Amino acid sequence: MTRIQDWRFLRCRLACLLALLLIGTAPAAAQETELVIATKEAAPFAMKAPDGAWKGISIDLWRRIAEQAKLHYRFVEDPTVQGLLEGTAAHRYDASVAALTITAERERILDFSQPFYLSGLGIAVPSASPTAWVLIVRTLTSLGFLQAILALIGLALAVGLLIWLFERRHNEDFGGGAIKGIGTSIWWSAEAMTQASTGHLAPRTGIGRALAVLWMIASIVAIAVFTASVTSTLTAGKLQGLVTSVSDLSSVRVGAVQGSATEEYLTARRIAYRRFSSPHDGLTAIRNGTLDAFVYDKPLLAWIVREQFAASAEMLDLSFDQQMYGIALPLGSRLRKPIDVAMLETVQSEWWRQILFSYLGEQ
């Protein structure tokens, strides 16, 4: 009987030890779960080397976060931003890391980490100045030129009508019926405005002559201002190009990447644009002369221009439509809290400043 009790006691002790061993190793096994982290090429935030290794601002940041949070992971590639977002929302990916803009529409189906980079849209334009004929045609067909021409014509018509009213009963040159008299008065007004000869026509009344003198002086000033404005526009266009600010986009040929946040910006402002599958295709169109401006995320666009299109394109020194980059996570992800803590610690460190400087030259 004693031997049987000893045997039972021994079995109980073995069972307890086995249970304790399983309990002790369960958290460690859970921590070793391999996370699937999706990314896509978006230089300089995510770049794939010929040997398949990934590097870039976002990739280096994720490695730093994973090291601090003790996360085990592997990278997988998805060719499109839409694929990253949909795969993460469907829990096929545990996180997506690239150059993902945080928007209200995306926030409805995903969780995002704390933002790690504040950016905006930028504009790439041809580095070569447009030809004189292109500038002339665009100036003559611009809205500002049309408004100036209509203003001068309106002034000439108004002065011609006043001359007819003052002279029609005292000067046979402006008489002979309303149609003939008004037509002659407007012709005289146009000749006076352009400094052409008006010797065969002249007002005779005192108020008519006073108006004529005022009109001749005013027209000299108006024509001088108009000429100076056109000359200044042509000179600035030759030196600076067709696009110098965001407001110029409405009058030139604009390109954007299909499915990007740029489309939302241009559509909201009713700016016509062509869709391209990638920034490379848009910048190729600029190099070929079929596009005047290409709009995209500024840091990504600046990198591609510098690395591949430095001879044919350049960046304007402006940024607009502020955007924030973050790490995309499935809704309710358990990773959000540890990622946010590690993110905040990292982006305030000297290490992060060195990363930005090494890739972008930013301090």
Image (spheres, helix red, strand yellow):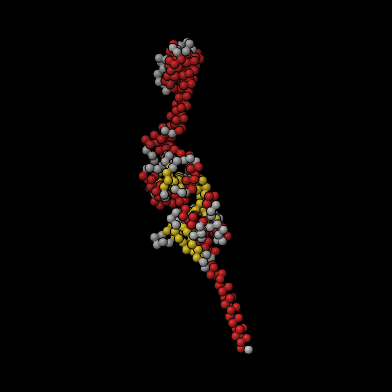
The answer to whether residue 293 is seen in the rendering is: no
- Considering depth in this image, is 79 or 248 the residue closer to the camera? 79
Quarter of the figure that contains the N terminus:
bottom right
Count every numbered label the image shows and give the total. Answer: 0
Residue 253 appearing in the image:
yes
Nearest the viewer among 254 and 60 is 254
Left or right: 312, with 354 as reference point: left
Give the residue displayed 42% in from the left and 19% down from the top: 187
Residue at figure coordinates x 47%, y 15% from the top left: 164
Residue 33 vs 39, above or below: the answer is below
Residue 249, compared with residue 6, is above or below; it is: above
Q: Residue at x 51, y 59 (%)?
A: 91
Give the residue at x 48% y 43%: 266
In the rendering, at what x and y percent does residue 181 appear? 44, 15
Residue 19 placement: quadrant: bottom right
Query: In the visual, does 300 lie left or right of 23?
Result: left
- Image x and y of residue 233, in percent: 43, 34
Residue 339 location (% of width, % of height): 55, 60
